[in-house]
């Protein structure tokens, strides 16, 4: 059976060259980078070479790159790091309602520790309004965190514009760039951010490794306490193979070229299946992301049917979320419950072909028709 | 491919029995799942106190569709009194079990059937099931 992977926002396969680059660092070159001997120096220089590659990709200096275990840690590090180092100045944080759980749950944690959080709404396309950010900042605000692009609906936020406002107010600005790094051009200076999270496995690197860009001079408390690794920012012996893999993925990163295929899939679905809608912004969106709502059907049922035909996608349906709540992002852009329920996300990757798209466009309409014929909400047919 | 469901669940999900609407049903049950917000409708035909036919329509996950299908199979041909003994656990068991997070979906099937019987009893005797209280929160107002 055909196997078509359209869930690249969840994770991507590591590029063969990435795996090749990592291989020597498991057994051959295994030294601890903190050791003074040759074994250690060999891996130390590998770690530093990887740091340079990350810095080059995002336009930072090498000292500003701290390796982490991935996107969630980078987000937690940024938020908690700034919060606990600056609580003397104020205890207010501004973020949006559509952030990744790694940011939202971290905010909830900080709330329990006495911080005040403002969750900004978004418009129907998922855009944060920079003017609302401006209004939300008080003299107690120490941090603003707005994602670069949303992982569910793909909307790309006006980060540079927001950064200008935040900077004027003298507040730290963090962006979660886990969905954009390695796919869109990123330059931390152009974006104007103080902190930026990225994760290797979202752009053909290995799982379990990421980085946090910390602008020179930014005050954060250390994330892990122990040895002096990462200039004291994050203790723990470096994940050398992972870090080398991240560096390799950064060096290989190319601006995503899948937008035309994505558009074909979008037009195909919207024109072949009645009562469907695009979620997210029509143009200000990730090139690889398509999110549609298919009325009268539920997402898990769609996914199971697609899976049986070899197609991997994802949904914002309550039935597949551990909490049994529909996607907070889809609710935030104003979708009624049942349309959030019937949402499908396809995220394309480097390996996606036109045949894959044609295959999905053949497979999906009959699945929808079958599920609609079973749905009590669908009055179109008996 | 590794589905979270048993083969039996997948069979009833992909090939649901008794799906669709019914002409002139004797009883109709409509219930909403208060947990995830899905809904189910069940229709029954009754003759001489026996469920002679049952059909359903479901907007919900794989487990919801499979349990509706199985529930209709289990009640068909049974006297009302016996069919009312149907529990969500029995439906889940007949399907070879459900993942723990999906047990609430089987409650929907049990309740949809009871709601249909309740409707039938009200129509024919003027009195419904003694302690019947279905969840019927509309989709948009669920919370937990
Ligand atoms: S009906 Fe929603 S989880 Fe089963």
Image (cartoon, coloured by chain):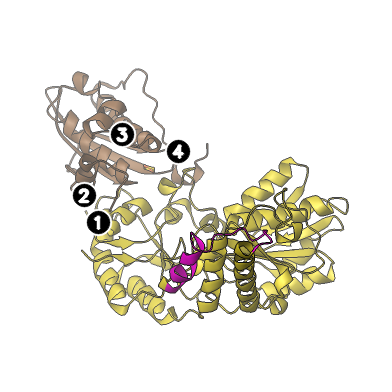
Chain colours: A yellow, B brown
Q: Which residue is drawn at 62% across and 73% down?
A: A49
Q: Is mark 4 within 8 Å of ligand 1?
A: yes
Confirm whether circles 3 and 4 share one chain.
yes
| Residue A153 visible in the shown view | no
Residue at 52% x, 67% y: name it.
A245
Q: Is residue A260 above or below residue A154?
A: below
Give the structural element (helix, strand or loop) at label 2.
helix
Give the distance between the C-alpha atoms of the residues marked 3 and 4, in whole angstroms.
15 Å
Q: Do the residues labelled 1 and 4 touch (CB within 8 Å)?
A: no
The residues tagged by marks 1 and 2 sit, at their Cα atoms, a distance apart of 10 Å
Between marks 3 and 1, how big is the CA–CA gap? 28 Å
Q: Name the residue under label 3.
A: B112
Picture coordinates of residue A8 (x, y %)? 43, 66
Q: Name the residue under label 1.
A: A308
Which one is closest to the eye, mark 1 or mark 4? 1
Task: Write down the chain letter for disc 2.
Answer: B
Nearer-N-terminus badge (4/2): 2
Label drawn at residue B35: 4
Identify which residue, A68 or A79, lies in the foreground. A68
Residue tagged 2: B14
Q: Earlier in the sequence, mark 3 or mark 4?
A: 4
- Residue A348 spot, x, y in % from top left: 41, 71
Frontmost residue, A258 versus B72: A258
Q: Nearer the viewer, mark 3 or mark 1?
A: 1
Q: Where is residue B87 in the image (x, y as percent from the top left)?
A: 29, 25
A113 relative to B7 in the view: left or right: right
Give the alpha-carbon distance from disc 1 to disc 4, as whole Å: 27 Å
Q: Is mark 3 on a helix, strand or loop?
A: helix
Residues in magenta, as a range: A17-37
Q: Are circles 1 and 2 on residues that touch, CB within 8 Å?
A: yes
- Front tag of 1 and 2: 1
């Amino acid at each position: 059976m055909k196997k078509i992977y359209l869930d690249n926002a969840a994770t991507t396969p590591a590029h063969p060259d990435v795996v090749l680059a990592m291989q020597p660092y498991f057994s051959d070159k295994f030294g601890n980078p903190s050791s003074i001997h040759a074994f250690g120096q060999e891996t130390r220089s590998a770690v530093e070479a990887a740091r340079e590659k990350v810095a080059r990709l995002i336009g930072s200096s090498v000292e500003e790159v701290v390796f982490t275990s991935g996107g969630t840690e980078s987000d937690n590090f940024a938020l908690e790091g700034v919060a606990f180092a600056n609580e003397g100045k104020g205890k207010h944080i501004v973020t949006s309602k559509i952030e990744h759980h790694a940011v939202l749950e971290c905010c909830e944690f900080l709330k329990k520790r006495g911080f005040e959080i403002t969750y900004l709404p978004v418009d129907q396309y998922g855009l944060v309004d920079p003017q609302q950010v401006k209004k939300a900042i008080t003299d107690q605000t120490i941090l603003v965190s707005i994602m670069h692009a949303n992982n569910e609906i793909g909307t790309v936020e006006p980060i540079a514009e927001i950064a200008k406002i935040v900077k004027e107010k003298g507040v730290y600005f963090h962006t979660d760039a886990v969905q954009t790094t390695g796919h869109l051009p990123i330059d931390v200076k152009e974006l104007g951010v103080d902190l930026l999270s990225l994760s290797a496995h979202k752009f053909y690197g290995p799982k379990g490794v990421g980085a946090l860009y910390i602008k020179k001079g930014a005050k954060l408390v250390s994330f892990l306490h122990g040895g002096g690794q990462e200039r004291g920012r994050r203790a723990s012996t470096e994940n050398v193979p992972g870090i080398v893999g991240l560096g390799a993925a950064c060096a290989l990163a190319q601006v995503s070229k899948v937008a035309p295929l994505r558009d074909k899939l979008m037009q195909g679905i919207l024109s072949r299946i009645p009562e469907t809608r695009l979620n997210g912004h029509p143009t200000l969106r990730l090139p690889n992301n398509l999110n549609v709502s298919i009325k009268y059907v539920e997402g898990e049922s769609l996914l199971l049917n697609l899976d049986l035909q070899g197609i991997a996608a994802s949904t914002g349906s309550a039935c597949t979320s551990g909490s049994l709540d529909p996607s907070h992002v889809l609710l935030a852009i104003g979708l009624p419950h049942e349309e959030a329920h019937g949402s499908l996300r396809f995220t394309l990757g480097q390996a996606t072909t036109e045949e894959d798209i044609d295959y999905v466009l053949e497979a999906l309409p009959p699945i929808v028709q079958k599920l609609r014929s079973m749905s009590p909400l669908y009055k179109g047919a008996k | 491919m590794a589905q979270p469901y048993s083969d039996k669940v997948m069979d009833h999900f992909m090939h649901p029995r008794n799906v669709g609407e019914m002409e002139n049903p004797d009883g109709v049950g409509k219930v909403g799942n208060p947990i995830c917000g899905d809904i189910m409708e069940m229709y029954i035909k009754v003759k001489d106190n026996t469920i002679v036919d049952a059909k359903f329509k479901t907007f919900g996950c794989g487990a919801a569709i499979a349990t509706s299908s199985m529930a209709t199979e289990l009640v068909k041909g049974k006297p009302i009194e016996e069919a009312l003994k149907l529990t969500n656990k029995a439906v889940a068991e007949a399907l070879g079990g459900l993942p723990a997070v999906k047990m609430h979906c089987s409650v929907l099937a049990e309740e949809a059937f009871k709601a249909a019987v309740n409707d039938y009893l009200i129509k024919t005797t003027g009195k419904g099931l003694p302690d019947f209280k279905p969840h019927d929160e509309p989709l948009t107002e669920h919370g937990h």
